[in-house]
Image (tube, rainbow, N blue to C red):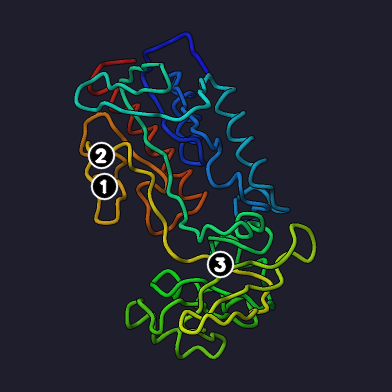
Amino acid sequence: MTIDREHFKVVIIGSGPAGLTAAIYAARADLSPLVIEGIQPGGQLTITTEVENYPGFPDGIMGPQLMDEFRKQAEKFGTTFITDAVSKVELNDRPFKVHVDKQLIFADTIIISTGATAQLLGLESERRLMGHGVSACATCDGWFFRDKEIAVIGGGDSACDEASYLTKFASKVTIIHRRDELRASKILQQRVLSNPKIDILWNQIPVEFIGAEDAPGLVGVRVRNAINGKESIVKVQGAFLAIGHSPNTELFKDYLKLDSTGYIVTKPDSSRTDITGVFACGDVKDSVYRQAITAAGSGCKAAIDAERFLLEEEGQP
């Protein structure tokens, strides 16, 4: 997609809740931002079914519809969109340079909201049943599985934490782990091992999620024993992937300060990165909460920080 401008005061890379909220605020501040949506406009919520924990929607709302409403609101106030992926950034000097296909875009400020991607098993059935019994977010979807039997895939801190959390809803939680011992911290292990609602299947590798995209959805997980190769089926109505998240920071690793797991480091109580004029918001800098509402809030902060930066450093925009 070609645009008729090449220089913007604010360029936002990413179009999930954080990026689109930043766009709404920046646009209402008369900064006419550009949002580079990426190859999956709307972020991870576009592969989510019903969202029931976003304020203002007591009856819930479908993930793609919610992000469409975000986008319409940003567009209403004057945001420009490119539905393509950034291939390269140059952050050594201002204005910054952003390469999209064959276009070169100049930016006085950049807001990074590229999110984080849940690590998946790579199974065809996993992709097909995502949102139909398979999930990668216990906080988002646990409520849907009240009084049902569910599985948690993984053996680290995330898996143990989510398994414990899910016992508030599920009648039974089964952790499926490919090894013979957990990798989680001792306190999380103790919490799991002492919970009567949690069972652990050791040395088991998920090979297929069984079910349909319509009712009844997921009905089981086929697993293979890592020692003897024997297969069996674990009957569950829900399965949660808890094998980690990867922040989408590949574009920025040569420029920005990242933490040990690859998330962008920002200054305390700020969205400012270690490069003046570059801001970060949403899951790309948040390894703890990873919620649509927290991402949206940080997008608001990033837009306000960028607006104030332009006022302070360059005078009234």
Q: Which mark is residue 265?
A: 1
The image quadrant where one finds the C terminus is top left
Image position of 214 with respect to 153: above or below: above
Q: Which residue is rendered at x = 49% and y = 27% of the image?
A: 84
Say which quarter of the image contains residue 249. Answer: top left
Q: CA distance from mark 1 to mark 3?
A: 28 Å
Local packing at callout 2 (Cα closer than 10 Å; few below 14, some 14-19, many 20+) is many
**Does residue 118 appear to the left or right of 133 in the view shown?**
left
Disc on the earlier residue, 1 or 3: 3
Label 1 amino acid?
Answer: Val
Disc on the earlier residue, 2 or 1: 1
Q: Which mark is residue 112?
A: none
Say which quarter of the image contains residue 260. Answer: bottom left
Q: Secondary structure at mark 3?
A: strand
Disc on the earlier residue, 3 or 2: 3
Say which quarter of the image contains residue 126. Answer: bottom right
Question: Residue 93: image x %, image y %?
Answer: 20, 22
Is the residue under label 1 in contact with that under label 2 (CB below 8 Å)? Answer: yes
Q: Secondary structure at mark 2?
A: loop
Q: Which residue matches tag 2?
A: 273
Q: Secondary structure at mark 1?
A: loop
Q: Which residue matches tag 3?
A: 240
